[in-house]
Amino acid sequence: MVKTPPPPALAQIEHLLRSFFHPTVLIELAALALCVGLAWLAVAALRRAFHHQDDSRPSILLGRKVVDGALFPIVLLGLGYVARALLREWISLAAFEIVIPVLIALVAIRVGVKVLQAAFPRSPWVRPMERTISWLAWFIMVLWVTGLLPRVLQELDEISWKVGGSRMSVRTLLEGVLTTGAVLLVTLWISSAIEARLLRSATGSVLSVRKALSNALRALLLFLGLVLALSAVGIDLTALSVFGGALGVGIGFGLQKLASNYVSGFVILAERSVRIGDNVRIDGFEGRITDIAGRYTLIRSAVGRESIVPNEMLITQRVENLSLADPRVWHSTVVSVGYDSDVELVMRLLGEAALVSPRVLRDPGPSVALSAFGADGLEFTIGFWIVDPENGVLSLRSEINLAVLRALRAHGIDIPYPQRVLHWAGAGAGGDAIAEPAAKPPSDAADAPRA
């Protein structure tokens, strides 16, 4: 009876299992522990050298902790290759035959996840894509360690078909997808690093210009990365001329609005007619610009509401920019006093009351004007300038009004309530006119005798 040899994959697994019981595995584990310690020290030294601090933008290489970024598995993988090359000269390796594929999978996962988090921090599809990258990397690692990867690739290569004059297979298709994804991840990594460097410590108009430059660089790098990926797969780029013509027709018809918004976004960032941090009013909505993306502009009001405005509206419609040339914004409040009040004293008290809030500018200072002779009293308008309307105006106006009320009550100045004159028709033409208040304030109503 002829004994059938085991399949190559099972033979490789049996060989690894037998090798793990060899005493030389202890040497490999000691070398692996040394590599982990050296990698940890190297990454910690780099963090101190770059003075890395946790901020709102996640770091791709360093991460939040020493072992959290992509740099730690990369350094550990390099040290692992060096240790494997040195130990292979004296002993038969077992642990490193598994450690190296695991580290390669970990590097792929860390780089892919960190790049997507940095490039698209608020996109909902990033989390499913991260899980997909993780499962795919670990699956390929298992096939590699067990020796099934060459057999799987051979089977996939046999599933082929003709596309014009070239031959395509499932293997080439998968390799093309992986190559394209890897190239796009590298281009996203480079564009995210450039964007972080450009936007660092940038404010005002400089921030808008650098934002436009970073968006243009990202689009250019993604285009070049896609072209390189398609070339690496073996796709003839001259065949894309037909697709380019179809895309032009699509932009001319169905994608006209979308293309207009993207072009408008670059025009806004280049002209700096509106900038990040400006307070604007458009289509009845007033707020502060927090972000200018390629397709839309995000405006946040003082009450916390956010409006997503297509960039085309900022080009074609009337926009009130409250802080384009001057960040100062003027606001006012109106106060009525009795006709027998001392006008000079009232104006002095109102001007002093407007200065109770530190948000009110001293230069130019607040102004008080007798704005109207009202039906019930003299109307004074208190005008004041502020530079932070995004922090809200209602609380500021309330603070000034309370200071006005305290000052007028302290000096005995009357704040009149509406009055009306009633003529009795039965009294005839010479009848008496009785003046009665149309409404009494709460304090008077509480003191009035009850029937």
Image (cartoon, rainbow, N blue to C red):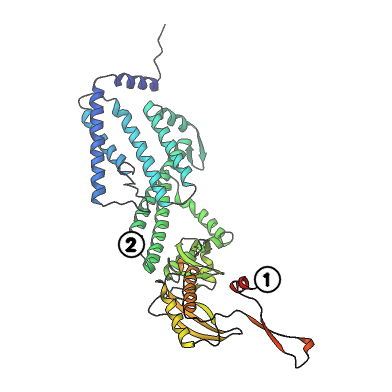
- Distance, label 2 to label 1, CA atoms, is 69 Å
Mark 2 residue element: loop
**Residue lying furthest top in this view?**
1
What count of labels does the image hold?
A: 2
| Up/down of 362 relative to 220, above or below | below
State which quarter of the image contains the N terminus: top left
Percent across and percent down for residue 168 are 48, 38
Residue at image point 44% right, 83% down: 348
Q: Do residues under tags 2 and 1 come within 8 Å of each other at their CB atoms?
A: no
Image position of 84 with respect to 445: above or below = above
- SS class, disc 1: loop
Q: Residue 296: horizontal and vertical position, in percent? A: 50, 61
Residue at point 61% right, 72% down? Answer: 447
Task: Specify whether residue 331 is in view.
Answer: no
Q: Indicate the quadrant containing the C terminus: top left, top right, bottom left or bottom right.
A: bottom right
Q: Is 53 or 236 nearer to us in this picture?
A: 53
Which residue corresponds to mark 1?
450
From this view, report whether residue 362 is shown above or below residue 389. Answer: below
Query: Residue 190's x, y, as percent?
Result: 35, 52
Image position of 447 (left or right of 144): right
Residue ID for mark 2: 201
Q: Residue at x 22, y 28 (%)?
A: 87
Q: Farthest residue toward the bottom?
A: 430
Q: In the shown orientation, is residue 287 left or right of residue 254?
A: left
Q: Residues within 10 Å of mark 2 (few under 14, many from 20)?
A: few
| Residue 369's disc number | none
What type is the residue that disc 1 sits on?
Arg
| Residue 176: quarter of image | top left
Of marks 2 and 1, which one's residue comes earlier in the chain?
2
Report crowding for label 1: few under 14, some 14 to 19, many 20 or more residues within 10 A (C-alpha): few
